[in-house]
Amino acid sequence: MALTLFRGCSRLSSSFNVARLCLNEGSTLSMSRKRRLSVPSIAASTVRPYSSEWKENKQKVVVVNIPHPLMWVRTQFYYFLIRTYFDKEFSIEEFTEGAKQAFSHVSRLLSQCQFEALEGLVAKDLIGRLKEKCNSLPLSYSTALSAESDDIMYTSSEDVGIFYDDNGRKFVSILMRFWYLTSAQLPDDNIEGARIFKVAIGEGAGEAETKKMLSALYEFQREFTKGVPPDWTITRIEHSKLLD
């Protein structure tokens, strides 16, 4: 099946409107337009406190992202195309909020090796590959796969794609990168290229805790053909060097 692909890349602090992602046992991960995430449309830096505990200790995690102006404009153009030709109510802000929920949920299932629960949320062929990889991971790596919502420090869109096939089916894919903190004990030399750093929590030596920041790539794809359910499916998952 031939596909026509238009693609735009970006490293922008972004957001997105997801209709819904169907989860196991008939539950639904809602990404409705009622829940909005206020994010600057183009920002030189993003500063986010990790949690209330961090606030009490006056500790902050600072994640700096400087998007390339041309890449930002290019990605905004693709968002315009999506709103014009696919979904007039599409919002990258709402999509990003929903993607964060999906990332947290799926990463937790991967960490617990609950592969059957991924059906309907992750592409079937991808589940098989993930199962093979996750079953051979050491415990510390499995733990590091999981990202709670409060541990997600920063989210950005890395790529946007619009697909057409010979039968007139229409697809949109959005590749998201998530930066998150983990307490898993990982050897630094084995996570090459993961851009991790350590943050000490607490002022006293007995209270100090070390966390590392890891990144993960999740690609969300949706078919916009008329009559097809408005569901986003995860078609790509990468966790630094954890899932090689």
Image (cartoon, grey):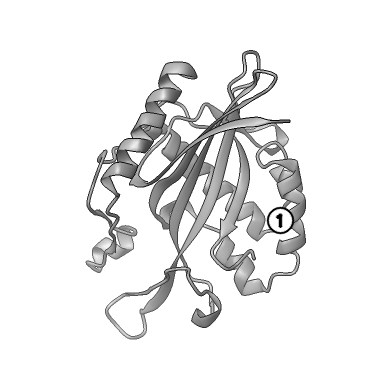
Q: Quadrant of residue 92?
A: top left
Q: In the visual, does 32 lie left or right of 47?
A: right
Name which residue lies at 73% across and 49% down: 127
For label 1, the SS is helix
Relative image position of residue 230 (x, y in whole percent): 59, 23
Q: Quadrant of residue 144?
A: bottom right
Residue furthest top as drawn: 227
Q: Decide if residue 88 is in sight here.
A: no
Question: In the picture shown, does residue 241 fall above or below 224?
Answer: below
Q: In the visual, does 170 lie left or right of 74?
A: right
Name which residue lies at 56% across and 78% down: 190
Q: Amino acid at mark 1?
A: Leu
Question: In the picture shown, does residue 154 fall above or below 231?
Answer: below
Front residue of this view, candidates 125 and 19: 125
**Quadrant (top left, top right, bottom left, bottom right) of the C terminus:** bottom right
Q: Decide if residue 196 is in sight here.
A: yes
Q: Residues within 10 Å of mark 1 (few under 14, many from 20)?
A: some
Front residue of this view, candidates 50 and 89: 89
- Residue under pointer 1: 130
Tally of numbered tags: 1
Relative image position of residue 218 (x, y in whole percent): 55, 48
Relative image position of residue 103 (x, y in whole percent): 53, 48
Relative image position of residue 210 (x, y in whole percent): 41, 76
**Quadrant (top left, top right, bottom left, bottom right) of the N terminus:** top right
Q: In the visual, does 206 lie left or right of 217?
A: left
Question: In the picture shown, does residue 4 fall above or below 158?
Answer: above
Name which residue lies at 71% across and 48% down: 126
Question: In the picture shown, does residue 84 fall above or below 215?
Answer: above
Residue furthest bottom as drawn: 205
